Each structure stands twice: as structure tokens, then as C-alpha cells.
Amino acid sequence: MKRASLFLTAALLASPLGLAHADDTTVKITKSAKPLPHLSADEKTSDGSVNAGGQHVDYQAVAGTLVVHPKGWDDTDKADIDGAGKPDEKSPDKSDTQAADDSNPSAEASMFYVAYFKKGAPVAGRPITFLYNGGPGSASVWLHMGAFGPRRVVTLDDSHGPAAPYQFINNDQSLLDVSDLVFIDAPGTGFSRIVGKDREKSFWGIDQDAHAFSDFIAAFLSKYDRWNSPKYLFGESYGTTRSAVLINQLEQDKSVDFNGVILLSQILNFDASVDGPEANPGVDLPYIVALPTYAATAWYHHKLGDNPPDLQSLLKDVESFASTDYTTALQQGAALDPAKRDEIANKLAQYTGLSVDYIKRANLRVDGGEFEKNLQGAETTTGRLDTRFSGPTMDPLSKEADYDPQSAAIGSAYVSVFNDYVRKTLGYGGDKYYKPEIEIDSWDMKHAPFGSSQPSTGSANVMPDLAAAMKYNPKLKVMLNAGYYDLATPYYEGIFEMRHLPMPQALQANIEFKQYASGHMVYAHQAALQQLHDNVADFIRRTEGTSPATGSANQGQAPANTH
């Protein structure tokens, strides 16, 4: 949850840096060569119950891994390395870890998951939701322990709480009242592991990551007989980037339609990120879409002088100013009339709580880190993930915030409770190290947009992918959830992206928007968690599908789910 790992550093966001795709060079392996490492799937099962959404739900939990391979893997050669690891009798000169085709990539990943299945529910009629956090480089511990798992950790609303022992309670807001749940750790995070030649290149990148998740979901649907269940994706932060690419791959490469895509704290176009936009001069969108969050934050901390009593009315005014007068002024650049410049600076000061002088020195463009550092003075840093949080400034002379107070406030509680729960209750992990997040300095941001065989050379933008998925499946429904106090992925940024998807106007009706008085991790605020549960549960109920023949809920007569 460190600033750089929520998603990539400003330099990486603003440029096409990242690893190149793996080359075609192969190494012939002989019996004398050192065997390549090989991962295998495993699982542990347990039983539990939860009171959620006014229902008592008995469930079976499965904690385990599934093995996936990079794009280009030929599974017809799997017999060479499957089972007991015996070599193919037709190829006695090959080692027990060599595929029949030497060009098959050797890298593989074991992806960790925790799945919760409601006991006695018909498989065909029971929705299933795949959930993951972002980073890139983050495990799913945050959504699992804070939002929708059957138990959740309790943290203070907007400040740093005491150390362990932490409170761990029944989660009344678990989504098990409406859906089975699968929390997935991305390759290399949590208990997921990657091995083999070019393992980082094979899994750490926009397209590589989406391919791994696509293969994982297909394998999961087969393993647990869920191909005919209503299906949903739920991604947070970079997980929304992943979802846009993933849903397109699932539809067009796997021929699997999903009922809905649920997005929390969205970023699809990295040119819109307010983290370090000065590295991308001439692109003023980040300042425009962040302004409403600046205003909400200043309002929360009582920095607006005559603080307006109604946040909603304030934000409506700020959104209008941001998309009209402010946009026009920034587009004029150095040609902006001095009198107009003064007018805009005064208006920005009125909405942000920053001084007119500071705003002018910033050339009317204040980035996220600068706002966090300066809003409450030199000694206090405002949060990034959740701007309701504050903490002591590390370096009073620094230009920008040096850390995120919310991450510091809640990280230990989430990680400690999960490590205890996964071992004692789910029976998984043992002495393995759980990686809540990993530092990835070389994430491959090059992305081949839908319809293109070559990756783009600028900042990543997966808006075309989501639009393509919605055109390919015009019945696909999308739900965007966002917090007013999120400065990592400002809520108005998500609205802007959705309104600019390259698709027919009629498909805009398939998108719905929900905002909350919380931050990036909307669920970290108790009242917002309840609203989030109710909104998502309602979305699933409305979109889980009906039988074309009868018009009734697609419950079928499948055997009860005993997984």
C-alpha cells in the first residue's frame, strides 16, 4: 500500500517504460540440464457460516492455487510435466520437466485464491464473483479482509489505531448473501508464485497479467463446474485496468460472456493520473479531474473558510467549473490573459483551500503530492488513498508528500489479521510467506489495444478494451464505484473516462455510477461499506439473468453446490 505500489510511479505512468515482451530464443534442454522448477496446484477446505445481508449463510471455503502459463503455452504437451512428473515414454531423451516443444515457455505461475461457496445453492443459478485488488503488485487481502469476506477487520475511521490485537468480526456486509466469492492474488503476490525463465516478463505487464487471470478464471470455472453460473468481475484500483482488458479477453478469446463488471476506484487512462503529471506537459486532464477531490478534501478538513454546509452542492459547482472555465484556461497555456489568470487562481483558492500565491507559483496546476503536502501546513500530511486521513509530515521541507497516512494507519491490521485467519481458520499457508504487496519497478505498461497487433507507445489507456467488450456483448452491465476522498484515482476521473468510451451512445445506459463519502478503499468507512454492499448486491440481483425460454430466474435443476 505504499505510494509507488498502489500503482506505478509517475515516471512510469507518463512514459512507455517497462519490460519488452519475451523474445523467441529457446534453449534446448537435455537430460543433463538442470530441471526447471515446476509448480503444482493445491487446496485446503474448511467450513464456516456468516450472517450477511440479513441472511444466515453456511459456506465451504477453499484456499488453494491453480497453475497458469504465459501466452503461447501449448497445453497438448502438458503430459510431459503433469502427474508424477514422469517423462513421456515416446521422448526418452527429454528431461522430466521439458515440454515436447522446446519453444513452449518455461515460466509458470501458481495463483492463490480463497473461494467461498454457499452450501446447498444450485450451481447454475448461483452467481460467482471474482475479486482482486490492483497495485500492480497488490494481493487481494484488502478486499478480502476489509470488504466482502465472511469476516472483516475493524479499523478506525480516519486515523491510526493501536497495534495488535485487532478486532476481527462477522462481516454483515459480506456479499455471500447474493454471490459465491473468489478472491485472487495476482502472480507473485500473496501466496502466488512465479518460476521459470523470463518469469517476470511473462506475468508482469498489462497484457501478460490479464492473460494469466483469464486462464485462471477458465480453469476455475472448469474445476468447480461454474461455466453456467452468472459471472462477475470485481476489480479495485489497478484491478479496474485489469478488468477492462480481462473482460475483453474472456469474451473474445474464451467465448465467455459475463453478466457484469464492477469497478471500484477506477483508472483506465493513465494520462489522467494526478501523480506526477508535470512529466507529461501539455496534458492538463489530471488537474481537471482531480479538482473535485481537492474541494471535497478541503471541505472535510474545514479549509474553505466559509465552509459550505452541503458537500454535494459544492461538488456540483466544482465539477462544472473544472470542465468549463478551468479547462479553457489551462488549454490556453502561456496565452492566458493575466486578468483571467488571476480570476482562475482566486477560484481555485476558493475551492482547494490553498493560497492564491501558491496556486500562481504552481502555474494553476497543483498535482496530488503537492496538494497532500500543503493543504494542512508543513507539519501535517494529508492522505492520498483516503484524504480524510492525516499524519505527521516526514520532511517539512519536501515539495510533495513522502508517504500515505491511510496506508500507515490500517496496513498492519489487515495483514496481521489475514495471516492469522488463513492459517488458523482456512488451514493454509504454514510457514510460507504471504506477500501483501510487492515492489515492481519494471511492469510492462505497453498494451496492444483491441484490434491492434502492436502495443501502443504512449501511456497505457484501456478504455478501448472496455468499450470493445461492451460492444461485443451489448448486454454487459458495468458499475463504477468511487470515493469522494480518493486522490489516487479521483472519482471525477472515472466519470470522465466512462463518458468518453468509444462506443454507441445507447450503451452508456449500461453503466451506472455510485459515489461514497470515503476514499480509495471505500469499505474502510463503515457507513460507506454498508452502502457499497447494498449497491453491489442490488446490481447483482438485477443482472444475474433470466431464462430466455421461461423468463424466470435461471435456477435450473443442477445439483446443490457442495464445493
Image: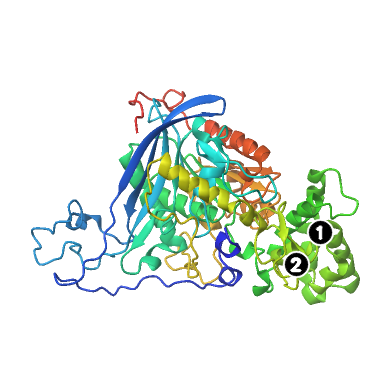
The answer to whether residue 503 is visible is no
Mark 2 lies on a secondary structure that is loop
> Identity of the amino acid at label 2?
Val
Q: Are marks 2 and 1 in contact (CB under 8 Å)?
A: yes
Residue 76: quadrant of the picture:
bottom left
Task: Say if 365 sits above or below 213 in the image.
Answer: below
Q: Nearer the viewer, residue 546 or 81?
A: 81
Q: Is residue 536 left or right of residue 425?
A: right
> Identity of the amino acid at label 1?
Thr
Say which residue appears at 38% left-offset and 30% top-offset: 124
Give percent across and percent down for residue 490. 67, 55
Q: Earlier in the sequence, mark 2 or mark 1?
A: 1
The answer to whether residue 116 is visible is yes
Mark 2 surroundings within 10 Å by alpha-carbon count, few (fewer than 14), some (14 through 19), many (20 or more): many
Q: How is the image coloured?
A: rainbow
Give percent across and percent down for residue 359. 82, 68
Q: Which residue is mark 1?
A: 352
Which residue is the extreme one toward the bottom? Answer: 334
Say which residue appears at 46% left-offset and 23% top-offset: 552
Q: Nearer the viewer, residue 525 or 239?
A: 525
Q: Is residue 96 left or right of residue 556?
A: left
Q: Which residue is mark 2?
A: 366
Mark 1 lies on a secondary structure that is helix
**Quadrant holding the C terminus:** top left
Residue 44: quadrant of the picture:
top left
